[in-house]
Amino acid sequence: SSDAAATLRALNQIYETNLSLDELAERLAPLGFYRVHKGFLVNFAHVSQLSSKGLTVAGELIPISRSKTAEVKLAYMDFLSKKNAVMM
């Protein structure tokens, strides 16, 4: 049993932290992370697909809260437009 407030999965690594997801979301937002569900914080740079069912990251479907669906879609589209602007 762990006292960590959150368990992070990055590539094949697992990290535990005492920070809450709210704290992590605030700190990682400038790096492209977004809170898509009460239990998930996603790095938009690693999203391969956005669908009505959720976001696909590393082949795994991450759910989006129903109350956040429109907000997450807009944030992801904004992320993509900024990424494409940098690439041009």
Image (tube, grey):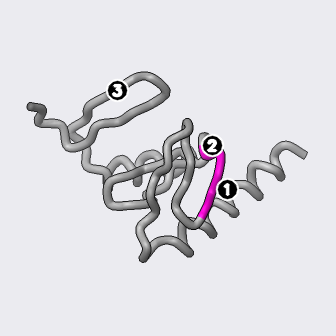
* Residue ranking furthest to the right: 88
Q: Which residues are magenta?
A: 47-51
Give the residue drawn at x 40%, y 23%: 13
Alpha carbon separation for disc pair 3 and 2: 18 Å
Evaluate if marks 2 and 1 touch, with contact meaning CB atoms under 8 Å apart: yes
Q: Residue at image x 43%, y 73%?
A: 66
Q: Is residue 37 magenta?
A: no
The amino acid marked with disc number 1 is Phe
> Regarding mark 1 in the picture, which secondary structure is present there?
helix
Query: Disc 1 designates what residue?
Result: 79
Give the residue at the far top of this rendering: 12
Could you tell me what secondary structure mostly forms the magenta stretch? strand
- Disc number for residue 14: 3
Q: As shown in the figure, which amino acid type bears the numbered disc 3? A: Ile
Query: Badge 3 local density, few (<14 within 10 Å), some, or many (20+)?
Result: few
Q: CA distance from mark 3 to mark 1?
A: 25 Å
Which residue is the site of mark 2? 45
Residue drawn at point x = 46 percent, y = 72 percent: 68
x then y, percent, for residue 73 = 60, 67
- Look at the image and tell me in which quarter the N terminus lies: top left
Q: Of callouts 3 and 2, which one flags the residue occurring earlier in the amino acid sequence?
A: 3
